[in-house]
Amino acid sequence: CVIALTIDEEGMARTAENKLKIARRAYKQATAFGIPAHDIFFDPLALPISTGIEEDRANADETIKAIREIRAEMADTNIILGVSNISFGLNPAARVVLNSVFLHDCVEAGMNSAIVNASKILPLIRFNELEIDTARDLIYDRRKFEGDVCTYDPLVEFTKLFEGKTAQSIKPDITSLPVEERLKHHIIDGEKIGLDDSLNEAMEKYPPLDIINNILLDGMKTVGDLFGSGQMQLPFVLQSAEAMKSAVKFLEPFMDKVEGVEKGTLVLATVKGDVHDIGKNLVDIILTNNGYKVVNLGIKQPIDDILRAAEDTKCDAIGMSGLLVKSTLIMRDNLELMNERGITTPVILGGAALNRRYVDQDLVPMFNGDLFYARDAFDGLHAMDRLTQSEPPAVAGGLPLARSAAASADDGVQPPATAGGSDEDLVGEDAKLGTVATRVSQRSGGDTTHTMRSDVATDVAIPTPPFWGSKVVEIKDLTKVFEFINETALFKGQWQYKQGRKSAEEYHKLLDETIYPKFAEIKAKAIRDKLLEAKVVYGYFPCNSDGNDLVLWEDEKATAERMRFTFPRQPVDQRGGKNLCLADYFASVGSGVTDVVAFDLVTMGRRASEHSAELFKSDNYQDYLLFHGLSVESAEALAELWHKRIRAELSIAGADAPELTKLFHQGYQGSRYGFGYPACPNLEDQAKLFELLQPERIGVELTEEFQLDPEQSTSAIILHHPQAKYFNVE
């Protein structure tokens, strides 16, 4: 790699304009020598803002502006700074605060690497609001004047704040606390620095097993309390779990192997045909770090393999997980088979498509053993505590009583991709379709015999596609995909940064200081390390409707039938129904004209799943959650991006809403539908889509249960009809 400082024949660049100009010149020269963009590091120079000299006042602001502009124009390159230069000459305590705030804002602007002394950088949550605000006033030169007289100088005020203070005084001092409290702080704060020393001291008083059971697990219980009350978000929970894992690893060599530290054993698996593992792995993390042994079998597990593992381990419970609707039916089949074999091992069920009503009303009565619904990993922990009669931590909700949000998840039909309520908890395709999707598991594939047509308009213009058949596209510039990410679905759904009891102001502070910087950091890493590979296969096909069927023709002259899809129709007596069926949105076989339907399948590539697995296996739990969430939501973003491309190619993009948030709410002409969801619940139709598009060309395979592998993939049938919107079929 090469590092290019923003210095030219005139000296060090001070303004963002000149820094960018030099960066452009260096970029052109470096790439001309064959140096790839991802090996170029630009240093836009952090110059002191602590001198009081007028020309130095804007140094930090200009550097941050330069970072933002370089990142926007040369997205594949890297940006690095020697951060501490900014605070040269200040009190050490003041330097820690100023450097930390400056680093935070640089990362938010797009910097992805830095030269720092890690021990002298702290998270902003460790500082008070006045310190942060005054630091930013200094960084952005927010002096106030009355005429020529300066009435507020941030440099003067910032210096006063730290008179007589040392760098150590601004960091909470836990050294004077008893070792028991110190260890709990390590776990709750997710702080690994000094953890080994505290553990060594604790072993002078307690056996290792007692340290785990009575001190460390008590810290994790507090983490559970904070999570349950909405005071701690999931990423910080995982940070605590990492500290817990490190502590246990440190203590293991000092423990007699026959002692054992597990409170119980859970055999955990994603059910047959389902490739999604994030929920399952979060359960593994939380239970493992709360004293349980978890036998994690992985994804796509047949019931025979699950039961064999349960018998071999003499487990206390079996955990079954799955993301999509089809998996809830597999869970039912698994429970029925357990009944047939007389197996009554307790079962814990979880997954985005499940809801408490379905479990309590449909599954609990038919299963002969104890059955629990776990809405999240801490519900799973609570269930295991009940089964093993361990003291349950305070968690979000309480089994077996249904919580209001979970109980109401399927009370009514709501619009897809809503930003509030229970839809915040849905991710992936479920988030796209909203809570409607959770109801599919409680019915069959819908009535396809009822064929009385709806009053959907038949006199609509039929677009002319740019080509017939399919083709493959690879998007090299990931920033184009990232622009279409639904941040609400990512932050609240995938990453679980929920507002909870926080005020709007507190939540916005969390967004600004933690979430957006993480978002920028992970996107930059994904680009730099080529962790995501955005690929699309899509196409246009001649078609007509025939009752409830969509008939695809061999050619645009409709000379021979190629295949047909059969869709369910809303029952006549469905409350709020309009007799709708997807076939109604196409010209009929008797209309004398041939219509067009589009299909697409998008993926972010198999490397995304591989990297997620690497992070999980290396106990980088927080990074695992964040990267996995980004990769899954990027697939949804790519689907949104490509649907927009298809509308443009069909010349119907004129109805597109200018705001991205409105596009997420179907602010455009037509609609796209995923197989396995309300309007087209037959997941087996994925096989026909594969026949049409041949997604193997972009590395996507179909599982035995008709789900897409890798999981960072999604497919759709795309309609152009102006009246086509999401609807439910009961």
Image: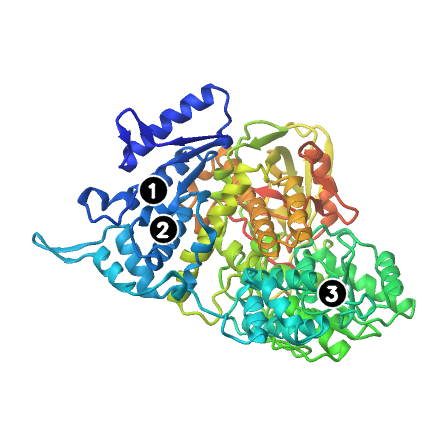
Q: Position of residue 341 (x, y in %)?
A: 92, 67
What element does badge 1 sit on? loop
Mark 3 Cα shell of 10 Å, populated few (<14), some (14-19), many (≥20): few
What residue is disc 1 on?
46
Q: Residues within 10 Å of mark 2 (few under 14, many from 20)?
A: many
Q: Nearer the viewer, residue 58 or 95?
A: 95
- Report the front residue among 671 and 178: 178
Reading the image, the residue beneath label 3 is 254
Q: Secondary structure at mark 3?
A: helix
Q: Which quadrant would the C terminus be assigned to in this image?
A: bottom right
Distance from the alpha carbon under mark 3 to that under mark 2: 43 Å
In the image, residue 533 above or below residue 30: below
How far is disc 3 from disc 1 in space, using C-alphas? Answer: 47 Å
Amino acid carrying label 3: it is: Phe
In the image shown, does 218 or 265 lie closer to the viewer?
Answer: 218
Nearest the eye: 251 or 681: 251
Taking the image as drawn, is residue 495 in sight? yes
What percent of the width, then of the height, locates residue 397?
Answer: 61, 75
Please say if the residues under marks 3 and 1 sit with CB atoms less than 8 Å apart: no
Q: Amino acid at mark 1?
A: Ala
For badge 2, the amino acid type reads Phe
Q: Is residue 4 left or right of residue 594?
A: left
Which numbered tag is attached to residue 102? 2
Label 1, residues with CA under 10 Å away: few <14, some 14-19, many ≥20 = many
Q: Tell me the mark number nearer the camera, choosing from 3 and 2.
A: 3
Q: Quadrant of residue 402?
A: bottom right
User: Which residue is depicted at the point 59% across and 75% down?
Assistant: 180
- Report the residue at 53% width, 36% height from top: 462
For the view shown, which residue lies furthest in the top direction? 32
